[in-house]
Amino acid sequence: MNFDDQAKTWDSDPVKQERAEAVAAAIRQRIPLSSAWRALEYGCGTGLLSLALHRDLGSITLADASPGMLAVLEAKFAAAQLDHLHPLRLDLTCDPLPSDRYDLIYSLMTLHHVAEIEPLLRDFHALLLPGGWLAIADLDWEDGSFHGAGFTGHCGLDREGLRAQLMAAGFSGVEFSTCYRMKKATDQSIREYPLFLAVATRP
């Protein structure tokens, strides 16, 4: 999947906006957000989730590996004069850890694109301050129809498998909930795909 090619039209899909708002609401419900917090969104795309949360948090770093996505969000932030949102080109599968540390790290529909999830979770743990929170919203395990033939990532994620990975990475208090049900056209019909929100803390 080439995210640079999709960047300019990404926000034209109303489902993506609805999904971001639903995930933001679920995060607010599960985590005691503070305007004093420093946050990191990993795999931010065009910044829809952080835009939905920016009034709830302090400084937000929006990290993505796609220059195209970052260019789109930089233009949006400049137009809206949101100077507490900071784009960062970052791919933790190959880049060193940033020096900053955060009170909250969150992601939306990112992990199922990552081949090796365990090292990424360990990086998230290292980037969080003690007592910090992690929120992962992603696709539940499915039959491969969501992306279709040729997709090289995971066909969603198994909740109990991810719970074990989070605990192995050092997180505690892992809890799951269903935060959104996404309808998408497949080869056969319109299908519904649940998204989970996993919340955990760094002790």
Image: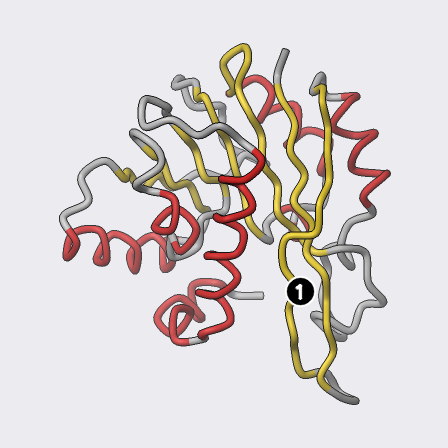
- Position of the N terminus by quadrant: bottom right
Give the residue furthest to the bottom.
188
> Where does the image place residue 88, in percent across and percent down from the top left?
35, 39
The residue wearing badge 1 is 181
Q: Quadrant of the rendered structure where residue 99 is?
A: top left
Q: Quadrant of the rendered structure where residue 185 is?
A: bottom right
Label 1: few (<14), some or many (≥20) within 10 Å? some
Eyeballing the image, is 153 above or below 39? below
Eyeballing the image, is 98 above or below 18? above
Amino acid carrying mark 1 in the image: Arg
> Where does the image place residue 50, in percent across and percent down from the top left?
39, 46
Give the residue furthest to the front.
29
Instruction: Identify the residue at horizontal 30%, vertical 29% (top origin).
Output: 58
Relative depth, front residue between 8 and 141: 141
Relative depth, front residue between 148 and 60: 60
> Where does the image place residue 73, in percent across and percent down from the top left?
30, 55
Relative depth, front residue between 201 and 72: 201
How many marks are shown on the rendered structure? 1
Instruction: Identify the residue at horizontal 56%, vertical 46% (top origin).
Output: 26
